[in-house]
Image: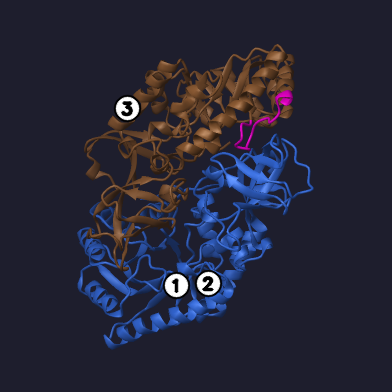
Chain colours: A blue, B brown
Amino acid sequence: MRVQDLETPAVLIDLDVMERNLARMAEYCRQHGLALRPHTKTHKIPELAYRQIKSGASGITVAKLGEAEVMVQAGLADILIAYPIVGREKAARLAALAERASLMVSLDSEEAVRGISRSAQERGVRVGVLVELDVGFRRCGLQRPEEAVALARLIQDLPNVDFRGLMFYPGHFMVSEPERRRLLEDVNVRLRRFYEAFDRAGLLIAIVSGGSTPTAYSSHEFAGVTEIRPGMYIFNDRTMVGLGVARLEDCALSVLVTVVSTSVSGRAIVDGGSKTFSNDRYRAGDGRGFGLVREDPEAEVEALSEEHGHLDISRSLRRYRVGERLTIIPNHVCTVMNLHDEVYGVRGDQVEAVWRVAARGRVR
Amino acid sequence: MRVQDLETPAVLIDLDVMERNLARMAEYCRQHGLALRPHTKTHKIPELAYRQIKSGASGITVAKLGEAEVMVQAGLADILIAYPIVGREKAARLAALAERASLMVSLDSEEAVRGISRSAQERGVRVGVLVELDVGFRRCGLQRPEEAVALARLIQDLPNVDFRGLMFYPGHFMVSEPERRRLLEDVNVRLRRFYEAFDRAGLLIAIVSGGSTPTAYSSHEFAGVTEIRPGMYIFNDRTMVGLGVARLEDCALSVLVTVVSTSVSGRAIVDGGSKTFSNDRYRAGDGRGFGLVREDPEAEVEALSEEHGHLDISRSLRRYRVGERLTIIPNHVCTVMNLHDEVYGVRGDQVEAVWRVAARGRVR
């Protein structure tokens, strides 16, 4: 099958670019002695998780228990669920899954770890636990070292859960390079306070799991980090390019669309909208626009209806015609993948693979 | 099954409220002699399309051909695809579908109608066509009356397609009431220009299809409209409430979530983010926030990560604890539905129905 035979809208993954992205991150981690545990919420495809393992990852990360179930079903054996598992049903599912794979979870509350311990004990399995720290993003994670030490001690005291170390997510690093550098100093001050408290308490930290795509190649500068969990690096996107984290030629994912209307002056309408691209905004530069049209840098993806992409072509000299195809690099690859049941791995004009997005929609 | 037995995040549809919404819109249309052709892109569930037919709709509207295929498969017999069908494969699929149901499409280009005519002729079927007009939203639709007349004449001349009338979508009416009133005047001026041109050309307009949820109860004030296509009215959402189009008690859809972290001061984190709610913004008031927490009007859904909802609870006196459940009314119901494989129809604390969102993700 050739790309031109695909119906639109269709998500295309350029395999050459993807393979280069995978190799580069693996090489960086090898050089710096960091374990690589890619976040598979970006692609949600077991076949791609396997490619990450083959290129040097030590295991994978998932966002939700339902994603872990899909990955274990596909044979992935070493998984961090970077999410607090809360509630009796979820703890029971986690324990059932721990019979089939080596699992770790991150959490920041007594409620979460007590539930997991109880279910793991009932099932006779063990679950590794990372205590999540807040390093400034203000989402999940304990803020004070003494709270983290207390939770680690509780984990050590509870049956069938193993305290393995610490986790943090620097989600506030979606900013430009000089600002990232300033934030890095701040994160390191915070991290060292936690390390000192654990040291004083005589608690051994085996793992410090950090990192994300914007910070990935600075991971060796984060104090004490032993493993990283970048996700987007496999594909990259318009925001990563805008933040200077990737180049345009590092973007592996684009969406093939068809022009369906040119009736309105200064506009071209394509057959992908927010149900194809998501409405995630551009988190760099002026924040405007919902994608980058490869064939016409003068076109702006000005707005998205649910099924229509609105291109402002008033500054373009290109002639648009109904029926022609364009490729658009989206603002945010993770939410694009989550909207599609299948995506296409392409090399040149050949479709080499059709992948089912097996963990799409597994929000529970 | 009871609501409390559901795992979270879960999309709940309050059946009492939904039934009231359906009855009210049907009654309005009856009063004003308007045909009701609800846009099923909002829910994407054949069972709910049937409920709309049962409560008085004359047929349904869909956004994409793939949605039409799902609805025809489920037995729905009268469908408007309010989208330009462009490309040989899609035209062939449309013609195949026209063997099984009465189909109309809207379009605004010669390219689209020629392709459809060709495929319909090959297959020996007929397809109804509405010419789409732009009334100020600047998306699809012809802007000048003489272009619309020329396209209608072409449709009359081509084999196996039937010119049925005109369609417009007032997508720019997502504004507050006084502004909507001003826009209505403007739309009517435009519409009358089209009607006069068609009259001069001796072309009969059988259908004028207009309307959306924000304008639904003003539909009788749009000049010449014979049918309307509201979608969101079945559920309503935070934006509809903010625009004064619905009351809070008219919101049938909410998302049941669990608090998974309270570690960060002034924050509570719930287990639904942009992959549960979509990142669609609040299109009313100050535009801030991503949902309304039923249990705590002082909480603001300040931001959405992919799997985390960030509640700013700094102005709230309520105490949040890990494990408790909340219900959140989203900004935009259509994109929420598109993220979930199944949703729950509830009455009181009882789950009466589990519906598969059968047309979810059918973007092609």
Q: Residue at 55%, 38% (x, y): give it.
A: B172
Task: Identify the element where label 1 is drawn.
Answer: strand
How crowded pointer 1 is (Cα within 10 Å; few <14, some 14-19, many 20+) is rated as many
In depth, the one of A227 and B27 nearer the eye is B27
**Towards the viewer: B34 or B361:** B34
Q: Is residue A93 magenta-colored? A: no
Q: Range of the magenta residues? A: B134-147
| Nearer the observer, B273 or A361 | B273
Chain where mark 1 sits: A
Res B93 seen here: no
Mark in front: 2 vs 1: 2
The residue that mark 3 highlights is: B19
Look at the magenta stretch and give its main secondary structure.
loop
Task: Residue lying at the far bottom in this picture: please name it.
Answer: A200
Q: Which residue is mark 2?
A: A215
- Residue A270 appears at what percent x and percent y? 65, 40
* Labels 3 and 1 in the same subunit: no
Amino acid type, residue under disc 2 in the picture: Thr
Regarding mark 2 in the picture, which secondary structure is present there? Answer: loop
Is disc 2 in the same subunit as disc 3? no
Image position of A321 with respect to B47: above or below: below
Letter of the chain that mark 3 sits on in the rendering = B
- Mark 3: amino acid: Glu
Q: Disc 3 on helix, strand or loop?
A: helix
